[in-house]
Image: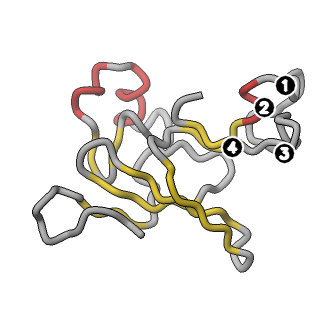
Amino acid sequence: MSGKILKVTRDGKGVPGNPWFTSGVSEDENIAKQWNLGIRNAWRFHYSEVDDIVYSINVGESSWETLYALEKGKNFGWPCTQGPIYDLPMMNYTACKDIQDGKIEAGFNYIWTYPHFFGEPQGTCIV
């Protein structure tokens, strides 16, 4: 379940309306529980009643912090993308090539991002 945002009932079952909870999929299957994928390390969340959207801050692997709106079914691109760049070492994987070639819609769908190179004036985390 790495890189996934889950939307489940209190007893851990998939919620009808989840993007991959389709006909023939049991509420107990992991795919039925997934709301988003391709997010590395979501560590802060905020629910906006105005937008009816959950927002998340994602800690980048080595160089970028991002803010995402966790809209239904989005793929945020990790491990193939990080912030506004492709993670070049990952580009040998078919899924990453497909993202780069536009065959899979994923990555670069953040609301805001910035580098967290230590010692640089950009800062080190989103709060």
Identify which amino acid the numbered label 3 is placed on: Gly
Dot 2 lies on which element? Answer: helix
Q: Residue at x 81, y 33 (%)?
A: 21
- Kindly check if marks 2 and 1 are in contact, taking CB atoms under 8 A apart as contact: yes
For label 4, count other residues whose C-alpha is less than 10 Å away and answer few (under 14), some (14-19) or many (20+).
many
Q: Position of residue 119 (x, y in %)?
A: 10, 62
- Kindly check if marks 1 and 3 are in contact, taking CB atoms under 8 A apart as contact: no
The residue pinned by badge 3 equals 17
Disc number lying in front (2 or 1) = 1
Horizontal relation, residue 88 to residue 38: left or right: left
For label 3, count other residues whose C-alpha is less than 10 Å away and answer few (under 14), some (14-19) or many (20+).
few
Cα distance between the residues tagged 2 and 1: 7 Å
Mark carried by residue 35:
4
Quick one: 87 or 10, which is closer to the camera?
10
> Considering only order in the chain, which callout, 1 or 4, is on the residue closer to the N terminus?
1
Cα distance between the residues tagged 2 and 4: 8 Å
> Considering only order in the chain, which callout, 2 or 3, is on the residue closer to the N terminus?
3
The residue pinned by badge 2 equals 32
Identify which amino acid the numbered label 2 is placed on: Ala
Mark carried by residue 20:
none
Dot 4 lies on which element? Answer: strand
Q: Is residue 93 above or below residue 27?
A: above
The residue pinned by badge 1 equals 28
Cα distance between the residues tagged 3 and 2: 9 Å
